[in-house]
Amino acid sequence: MSALGDGFDAVICDLDGVVYTGPVAVDHAVDSLNALTVPVVYATNNASRTTGEVGERLRSFGIVTSDDVVLTSSLAAARELASTVSRGAPVLAIGGEGVAASLRSVGLQPRRPGDEGEVVAVLQGYGPGVTAADLGAAAVAVRSGARWVATNDDLTLPTEEGPVPGNGALVAAVRLAVDVEPEVIGKPHPPMYRLAAQAAGARAARTVAVGDRLETDIAGALAAGMAAVLVLTGVHGPADAAAAPPERRPTHVLTDLRGLCEPYPQQVMEGDWFVRGAARARCGEALEVEGHGVDATRAALDALWDAVDARRITSGRARALLVNR
Protein backbone atom coordinates (compact mmCIF):
# COMPACT_ATOMS: atom_id res chain seq x y z
CA MET A 1 0.00 0.00 0.00
CA SER A 2 1.43 3.41 -0.97
CA ALA A 3 1.82 6.37 1.37
CA LEU A 4 -1.12 8.74 1.76
CA GLY A 5 0.76 11.68 0.26
CA ASP A 6 1.71 9.70 -2.84
CA GLY A 7 -1.96 9.36 -3.74
CA PHE A 8 -2.20 13.06 -4.64
CA ASP A 9 -0.50 15.45 -7.03
CA ALA A 10 0.03 18.20 -4.45
CA VAL A 11 -0.25 18.98 -0.74
CA ILE A 12 -1.51 22.28 0.66
CA CYS A 13 -0.17 22.66 4.18
CA ASP A 14 -1.32 25.01 6.92
CA LEU A 15 1.37 26.43 9.19
CA ASP A 16 0.52 27.28 12.80
CA GLY A 17 -0.34 24.13 14.72
CA VAL A 18 0.75 21.94 11.81
CA VAL A 19 4.33 22.91 10.95
CA TYR A 20 5.17 24.99 14.00
CA THR A 21 3.71 26.28 17.24
CA GLY A 22 5.12 29.68 18.05
CA PRO A 23 8.92 29.47 17.81
CA VAL A 24 9.07 25.65 17.87
CA ALA A 25 8.59 23.17 15.02
CA VAL A 26 5.90 20.55 15.59
CA ASP A 27 7.41 17.11 16.23
CA HIS A 28 8.13 15.17 13.01
CA ALA A 29 6.82 17.98 10.77
CA VAL A 30 10.12 18.99 9.17
CA ASP A 31 11.33 15.49 8.29
CA SER A 32 7.90 14.46 7.02
CA LEU A 33 7.49 17.48 4.74
CA ASN A 34 10.99 17.11 3.35
CA ALA A 35 10.28 13.44 2.62
CA LEU A 36 7.23 14.13 0.43
CA THR A 37 7.72 13.51 -3.28
CA VAL A 38 4.85 15.77 -4.44
CA PRO A 39 4.80 19.59 -4.45
CA VAL A 40 3.87 21.29 -1.18
CA VAL A 41 2.28 24.74 -1.03
CA TYR A 42 2.29 26.43 2.37
CA ALA A 43 -0.95 28.37 2.81
CA THR A 44 -1.75 30.62 5.75
CA ASN A 45 -4.50 33.06 6.65
CA ASN A 46 -1.85 35.29 8.25
CA ALA A 47 -1.90 38.40 6.05
CA SER A 48 0.59 40.56 7.93
CA ARG A 49 3.79 38.75 6.89
CA THR A 50 5.34 38.71 3.44
CA THR A 51 5.91 35.43 1.60
CA GLY A 52 9.65 36.01 2.04
CA GLU A 53 9.28 36.25 5.80
CA VAL A 54 7.20 33.09 5.92
CA GLY A 55 9.58 31.25 3.62
CA GLU A 56 12.58 32.26 5.70
CA ARG A 57 10.87 31.04 8.84
CA LEU A 58 10.14 27.67 7.27
CA ARG A 59 13.75 27.33 6.13
CA SER A 60 14.96 28.26 9.62
CA PHE A 61 13.31 25.06 10.88
CA GLY A 62 15.08 23.04 8.18
CA ILE A 63 12.26 22.75 5.64
CA VAL A 64 13.49 22.71 2.06
CA THR A 65 11.22 25.19 0.28
CA SER A 66 11.13 28.44 -1.67
CA ASP A 67 9.13 31.64 -1.33
CA ASP A 68 7.15 30.98 -4.51
CA VAL A 69 5.28 28.09 -2.86
CA VAL A 70 4.19 30.21 0.09
CA LEU A 71 0.66 31.60 -0.20
CA THR A 72 -0.57 34.08 2.37
CA SER A 73 -4.16 35.26 2.39
CA SER A 74 -2.96 38.74 1.38
CA LEU A 75 -1.13 37.37 -1.66
CA ALA A 76 -4.15 35.24 -2.61
CA ALA A 77 -6.38 38.30 -2.34
CA ALA A 78 -3.95 40.44 -4.34
CA ARG A 79 -3.83 37.83 -7.11
CA GLU A 80 -7.61 37.71 -7.18
CA LEU A 81 -7.74 41.49 -7.54
CA ALA A 82 -5.03 41.53 -10.22
CA SER A 83 -7.08 39.16 -12.35
CA THR A 84 -9.90 41.70 -12.64
CA VAL A 85 -8.34 45.19 -12.54
CA SER A 86 -5.77 46.86 -14.77
CA ARG A 87 -2.06 46.60 -14.01
CA GLY A 88 -0.83 49.45 -11.84
CA ALA A 89 -4.29 50.19 -10.46
CA PRO A 90 -4.26 51.96 -7.07
CA VAL A 91 -5.51 49.86 -4.14
CA LEU A 92 -5.91 51.01 -0.55
CA ALA A 93 -3.82 48.68 1.62
CA ILE A 94 -5.13 48.17 5.16
CA GLY A 95 -3.03 45.93 7.38
CA GLY A 96 0.57 44.88 7.89
CA GLU A 97 3.43 45.07 5.39
CA GLY A 98 2.35 41.76 3.90
CA VAL A 99 -0.72 43.43 2.38
CA ALA A 100 1.20 46.19 0.55
CA ALA A 101 3.98 43.81 -0.48
CA SER A 102 1.45 41.40 -1.98
CA LEU A 103 -0.15 44.15 -4.03
CA ARG A 104 3.25 45.25 -5.38
CA SER A 105 4.16 41.66 -6.24
CA VAL A 106 1.19 41.37 -8.63
CA GLY A 107 1.71 44.74 -10.29
CA LEU A 108 -0.82 46.80 -8.33
CA GLN A 109 -0.08 50.11 -6.61
CA PRO A 110 -0.63 50.06 -2.84
CA ARG A 111 -1.94 53.27 -1.28
CA ARG A 112 -1.88 53.99 2.41
CA PRO A 113 -4.60 55.82 4.34
CA GLY A 114 -3.96 59.53 3.88
CA ASP A 115 -2.47 59.20 0.39
CA GLU A 116 -4.08 61.41 -2.22
CA GLY A 117 -6.16 60.08 -5.11
CA GLU A 118 -8.99 57.64 -5.61
CA VAL A 119 -8.55 53.87 -5.38
CA VAL A 120 -10.27 51.11 -7.34
CA ALA A 121 -10.30 48.69 -4.42
CA VAL A 122 -9.59 48.21 -0.74
CA LEU A 123 -7.55 45.21 0.38
CA GLN A 124 -8.03 44.69 4.10
CA GLY A 125 -5.83 42.32 6.08
CA TYR A 126 -4.65 42.01 9.64
CA GLY A 127 -1.88 44.17 11.02
CA PRO A 128 -1.01 44.85 14.67
CA GLY A 129 -0.72 48.57 13.88
CA VAL A 130 -4.13 48.99 12.23
CA THR A 131 -5.86 52.06 13.68
CA ALA A 132 -9.39 53.40 13.84
CA ALA A 133 -8.32 55.98 11.26
CA ASP A 134 -7.25 53.17 8.89
CA LEU A 135 -10.66 51.52 9.26
CA GLY A 136 -12.32 54.87 8.65
CA ALA A 137 -10.33 55.37 5.44
CA ALA A 138 -11.44 51.91 4.28
CA ALA A 139 -15.09 52.75 4.96
CA VAL A 140 -14.84 56.03 3.05
CA ALA A 141 -13.28 54.31 0.04
CA VAL A 142 -15.89 51.53 0.00
CA ARG A 143 -18.74 54.03 0.22
CA SER A 144 -17.15 55.87 -2.73
CA GLY A 145 -17.46 52.74 -4.86
CA ALA A 146 -14.14 50.94 -4.30
CA ARG A 147 -14.25 47.15 -4.45
CA TRP A 148 -13.76 45.71 -0.94
CA VAL A 149 -11.69 42.56 -0.57
CA ALA A 150 -10.78 41.03 2.79
CA THR A 151 -7.88 38.63 3.16
CA ASN A 152 -9.78 36.53 5.71
CA ASP A 153 -12.53 36.84 8.28
CA ASP A 154 -11.04 35.05 11.29
CA LEU A 155 -12.66 36.75 14.27
CA THR A 156 -9.76 36.00 16.61
CA LEU A 157 -6.02 35.62 16.37
CA PRO A 158 -4.20 33.17 18.68
CA THR A 159 -1.38 34.60 20.81
CA GLU A 160 0.67 33.36 23.74
CA GLU A 161 -1.62 35.43 25.99
CA GLY A 162 -4.78 33.99 24.45
CA PRO A 163 -7.04 35.05 21.57
CA VAL A 164 -7.16 38.69 20.48
CA PRO A 165 -9.36 40.38 17.83
CA GLY A 166 -8.43 39.15 14.35
CA ASN A 167 -9.04 40.47 10.88
CA GLY A 168 -12.66 39.36 10.95
CA ALA A 169 -13.29 41.69 13.89
CA LEU A 170 -11.66 44.59 12.01
CA VAL A 171 -13.67 43.78 8.88
CA ALA A 172 -16.83 43.75 10.98
CA ALA A 173 -16.00 47.24 12.26
CA VAL A 174 -15.84 48.55 8.69
CA ARG A 175 -19.01 46.67 7.76
CA LEU A 176 -20.91 48.62 10.42
CA ALA A 177 -20.15 51.81 8.49
CA VAL A 178 -20.96 50.63 4.94
CA ASP A 179 -23.77 48.87 3.07
CA VAL A 180 -21.50 46.42 1.26
CA GLU A 181 -20.38 42.90 2.08
CA PRO A 182 -16.67 42.23 1.55
CA GLU A 183 -15.31 39.58 -0.78
CA VAL A 184 -13.39 37.21 1.49
CA ILE A 185 -10.54 35.24 -0.09
CA GLY A 186 -8.79 33.34 2.71
CA LYS A 187 -9.76 30.13 4.46
CA PRO A 188 -12.39 28.71 4.58
CA HIS A 189 -13.39 30.35 1.31
CA PRO A 190 -12.58 28.40 -1.88
CA PRO A 191 -10.46 31.07 -3.68
CA MET A 192 -7.53 30.49 -1.32
CA TYR A 193 -7.50 26.77 -2.09
CA ARG A 194 -8.03 27.26 -5.81
CA LEU A 195 -5.04 29.62 -5.98
CA ALA A 196 -2.92 27.24 -3.88
CA ALA A 197 -3.69 24.36 -6.24
CA GLN A 198 -2.75 26.57 -9.20
CA ALA A 199 0.57 27.39 -7.51
CA ALA A 200 1.27 23.64 -7.31
CA GLY A 201 0.13 23.00 -10.87
CA ALA A 202 -2.52 20.57 -9.66
CA ARG A 203 -6.28 20.11 -10.00
CA ALA A 204 -8.36 20.46 -6.85
CA ALA A 205 -9.60 16.89 -7.12
CA ARG A 206 -5.99 15.67 -7.05
CA THR A 207 -4.93 17.87 -4.12
CA VAL A 208 -5.01 17.22 -0.38
CA ALA A 209 -5.09 20.04 2.17
CA VAL A 210 -3.68 19.58 5.67
CA GLY A 211 -4.70 21.63 8.70
CA ASP A 212 -5.57 21.62 12.38
CA ARG A 213 -8.78 23.69 12.37
CA LEU A 214 -12.12 22.26 11.27
CA GLU A 215 -13.89 25.55 10.51
CA THR A 216 -11.11 26.93 8.29
CA ASP A 217 -8.67 24.30 6.99
CA ILE A 218 -11.06 21.38 6.71
CA ALA A 219 -14.19 23.29 5.67
CA GLY A 220 -12.25 25.26 3.06
CA ALA A 221 -10.62 22.22 1.52
CA LEU A 222 -13.90 20.35 1.24
CA ALA A 223 -15.66 23.39 -0.23
CA ALA A 224 -12.95 23.55 -2.90
CA GLY A 225 -13.40 19.88 -3.81
CA MET A 226 -10.20 18.67 -2.14
CA ALA A 227 -9.44 15.88 0.28
CA ALA A 228 -8.97 17.24 3.80
CA VAL A 229 -6.53 16.01 6.44
CA LEU A 230 -6.97 16.89 10.10
CA VAL A 231 -3.66 16.62 11.91
CA LEU A 232 -4.01 16.26 15.69
CA THR A 233 -1.15 18.59 16.66
CA GLY A 234 -3.05 21.86 16.86
CA VAL A 235 -6.42 23.37 17.75
CA HIS A 236 -8.96 20.60 17.14
CA GLY A 237 -8.92 17.03 18.35
CA PRO A 238 -10.95 13.85 17.77
CA ALA A 239 -13.87 14.97 19.96
CA ASP A 240 -14.24 18.16 17.92
CA ALA A 241 -14.23 16.09 14.73
CA ALA A 242 -16.87 13.74 16.16
CA ALA A 243 -19.25 16.67 16.65
CA ALA A 244 -18.51 18.30 13.29
CA PRO A 245 -21.22 18.66 10.63
CA PRO A 246 -20.55 16.91 7.30
CA GLU A 247 -19.05 20.03 5.68
CA ARG A 248 -16.34 20.10 8.37
CA ARG A 249 -15.51 16.40 8.64
CA PRO A 250 -11.96 15.51 7.59
CA THR A 251 -11.36 12.91 4.91
CA HIS A 252 -8.31 11.67 6.80
CA VAL A 253 -7.11 11.99 10.41
CA LEU A 254 -3.41 11.90 11.31
CA THR A 255 -1.61 11.95 14.64
CA ASP A 256 1.10 14.11 13.06
CA LEU A 257 2.58 14.74 9.62
CA ARG A 258 4.35 11.39 9.56
CA GLY A 259 0.98 10.05 8.46
CA LEU A 260 1.45 11.64 5.04
CA CYS A 261 4.38 9.31 4.48
CA GLU A 262 2.56 6.19 5.69
CA PRO A 263 -0.24 4.05 4.21
CA TYR A 264 -3.75 5.09 5.22
CA PRO A 265 -6.21 2.24 5.90
CA GLN A 266 -9.41 2.29 3.90
CA GLN A 267 -12.77 1.99 5.62
CA VAL A 268 -14.12 -1.57 5.58
CA MET A 269 -17.47 -2.79 6.92
CA GLU A 270 -17.78 -6.07 8.87
CA GLY A 271 -21.45 -6.30 9.71
CA ASP A 272 -22.17 -3.17 11.75
CA TRP A 273 -18.48 -2.66 12.60
CA PHE A 274 -16.47 0.11 10.92
CA VAL A 275 -12.95 -1.18 10.40
CA ARG A 276 -9.75 0.85 9.94
CA GLY A 277 -6.59 -1.21 9.86
CA ALA A 278 -6.37 -3.31 13.01
CA ALA A 279 -9.12 -1.37 14.81
CA ARG A 280 -12.91 -1.39 14.56
CA ALA A 281 -15.85 0.44 16.13
CA ARG A 282 -19.61 0.51 16.16
CA CYS A 283 -22.16 2.80 17.75
CA GLY A 284 -25.52 1.71 19.14
CA GLU A 285 -26.61 3.00 22.52
CA ALA A 286 -22.92 3.13 23.36
CA LEU A 287 -19.68 3.42 21.41
CA GLU A 288 -17.71 0.19 21.20
CA VAL A 289 -14.09 0.37 20.05
CA GLU A 290 -11.64 -2.47 19.64
CA GLY A 291 -8.02 -1.65 18.94
CA HIS A 292 -5.63 1.13 19.78
CA GLY A 293 -3.94 4.22 18.39
CA VAL A 294 -5.04 6.46 15.58
CA ASP A 295 -6.77 3.63 13.69
CA ALA A 296 -9.11 3.23 16.67
CA THR A 297 -9.84 6.97 16.51
CA ARG A 298 -10.55 6.75 12.78
CA ALA A 299 -12.90 3.79 13.21
CA ALA A 300 -14.67 5.50 16.11
CA LEU A 301 -15.24 8.62 14.02
CA ASP A 302 -16.66 6.53 11.18
CA ALA A 303 -19.12 4.89 13.54
CA LEU A 304 -20.10 8.13 15.27
CA TRP A 305 -20.64 10.07 12.05
CA ASP A 306 -22.84 7.24 10.75
CA ALA A 307 -24.89 7.33 13.95
CA VAL A 308 -25.26 11.13 13.82
CA ASP A 309 -26.29 11.08 10.14
CA ALA A 310 -28.85 8.36 10.88
CA ARG A 311 -30.13 10.52 13.76
CA ARG A 312 -29.53 7.80 16.30
CA ILE A 313 -27.45 10.24 18.36
CA THR A 314 -26.81 13.99 18.39
CA SER A 315 -23.49 15.61 17.57
CA GLY A 316 -23.15 16.55 21.23
CA ARG A 317 -23.64 12.93 22.21
CA ALA A 318 -21.02 11.90 19.64
CA ARG A 319 -18.52 14.25 21.25
CA ALA A 320 -19.27 12.90 24.72
CA LEU A 321 -18.99 9.27 23.60
CA LEU A 322 -15.57 9.84 22.06
CA VAL A 323 -14.29 11.76 25.07
CA ASN A 324 -15.42 9.03 27.44
CA ARG A 325 -14.52 5.95 25.39
Image (cartoon, grey):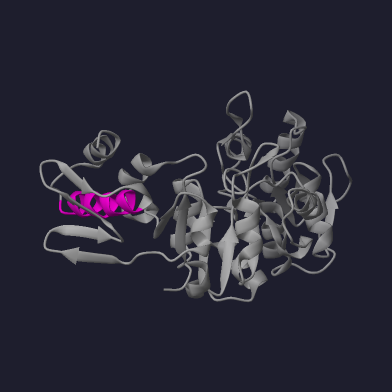
The residue sitting at the top extreme is 161
In this picture, is 140 found above or below 76?
A: above
Residue 283 in percent (x, y) is at 16, 48
- Up-down relation of residue 41 to residue 176 (above or below): below
* 189 part of magenta stretch: no
Quadrant for the N terminus, please.
bottom left
Report if residue 98 is visible in the image. yes
Q: Determine the residue positioned at 76% across, 46% down.
A: 49
In front of the other: 4 or 182: 4
Location of residue 221 in the rendering, given as x and y in whole percent from the top left corner: 48, 60
- What residue sits 61% from the left and 30% below the top? 165
Q: Quadrant of residue 63?
A: bottom right
Quarter holding the C terminus is: top left
Would you say 274 lies left or right of 246 here? left
Q: Judge from the rendering whether residue 224 lies leftward or rightward of residue 94; answer left or right.
A: left
- For this rendering, which residue is in front, 262 or 316? 262
Q: Which residues are magenta?
A: 295-310
Q: Which secondary structure class fits the magenta region best?
A: helix
